Image (cartoon, grey):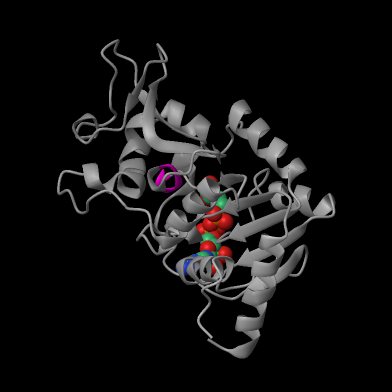
Amino acid sequence: MNHDTERALDKAAAILAGARSVIAFTGAGISAESGVPTFRGAGGIWERYDERHLELGYFRAHPELAWPTIRDIFYAFASPDGERPPFQPNDAHRVLAAWEQQGILNFTVTQNIDGLHAAAGSRRLSEFHGTTATLSCMRCGARVPSARELLETLPPRCPCGGIYKPDFTFFGEGIDPAASSSAYDAARKADVCLVIGSTGLVYPAATIPRVVAGGGGTVIEVNPEPSTFTDDITGVFLPMGASEALVALDRRLRGTATP
Ligand code: APR
C-alpha cells in the first residue's frame, strides 16, 4: 500500500475516533467482494439486463415477463439449475456491524437490497431501497420470506391468487417512508459520513452523504474509483476495496495498526 494511502487511512481513522456521530452510506461496491454483481461498471447488471423489467409500471403490467429477469439477477440461488448458494457478508459488512456494537458507528444507510448488512449483525440500519429477503402479495399484502421453492414457478403466487412483488424499490416507486425518515434523521445528526462503494448516481439515496456534508460534516469515501461524490463532497478519499479499507481502519481504531 503506498504512502499516500497509508496517510489517508491515518487521517480517516483520526476523524472517526474523534467523531460525535458517524453514519455509513453503502452501495453495491461493499458487496462486490461477496460476489454480488454491481449495477454499473465493467460486467455490471445493467449491461446484461433490461432495466425496464425493474420499473414498477412494467412489473405490474407484465409480471410474467419481469420475474424471470428479477430471479436471475437477485435470486439465482432459486433458479432451476440452482447456480449458486445465497451470498454471504464480507469483512467490510462485519466491521461495520462490530463498530455499531462498539458505539463507533451510529447508523448504516444502505442502497443494497442483498440483506448482507443485516446478516452481518447491523441493527441500526436503513435498507433505503428495501430488501430481496421478503416478497409481498400485490392483492392481499401478505409478506413472506423469499424462499427457494416459492420462486421455482414464476410469477410466484400467494395462496389468495395474487402475485408476489419483491420488497425492494422498483424504478418509479417511492422510497419506504420508515427507511427514508430513519436515514435522514441519522444523517442530520451525523458529523461524519463513511461512503463505501457507490457511484452516487441514484437519487434520492445520493442526498444522504450530501446532508452530512451540508451540515458541516466530513465525508470519508472508500472506492477503488472516483465517484460523483469524490470531487464534490469527499474530504478523505481511500482508493481501496471495501474489505481492505475497513479492516485497515479497524486496526487503527483498535491501536493495532501494523507499522
Ligand atoms: N469496494 C468498494 N467499492 C467498489 C468495489 C469494492 N471492492 N468494487 C466496485 N466498487 C464501486 C464502483 O467503483 C462503483 O463506484 O462500487 C460502485 C458501484 O456502483 P453502482 O453499481 O452504481 O452501485 P450503487 O452506487 O450502489 O447504485 C445505486 O442504482 O440501480 C440502482 O437501486 C440500484 O441501489 C442501486 C443504485
Q: Can residue 39 be seen in this snapshot?
A: no
Q: Residue furthest bottom?
A: 3
Q: Residue at x 77, y 47 (%)?
A: 211
Does any portion of residue 94 appear in the rendered image?
yes
Rendered view: 121 above or below 57: below
Q: Residue at x 52, y 72 (%)?
A: 248
Which span is picked out in magenta?
A: 114-118
Instruction: Decide which of 128, 46 is in the foreground and name it.
Output: 128
Q: Position of residue 65 (x, y in %)?
A: 35, 36
- Number of marks drawn: 0
Q: Residue at x 36, y 60 (%)?
A: 34
Magenta segment includes 115: yes
Q: Main secondary structure of the magenta part?
A: helix
Residue 92 lies, in percent from the top left, at 46, 60
Quadrant assignment for the C terminus: bottom right
Which residue is situated farthest in the front direction here? Answer: 255
205 or 152: nearer the viewer: 205
Q: Nearer the viewer, residue 203 or 58?
A: 203
On screen, residue 165 versus residue 224, left or right, reads left
Q: Position of residue 242 (x, y in %)?
A: 50, 66
Tell me, yes or no, whether the highlighted magenta stretch contains residue 86.
no
Q: Is residue 60 above or below residue 38?
A: above
Task: Say whether residue 133 is left or right of residue 185.
Answer: left
Above or below, comparing residue 193 to residue 142 in the picture:
below
Give the x, y percent position of residue 169. Answer: 52, 36
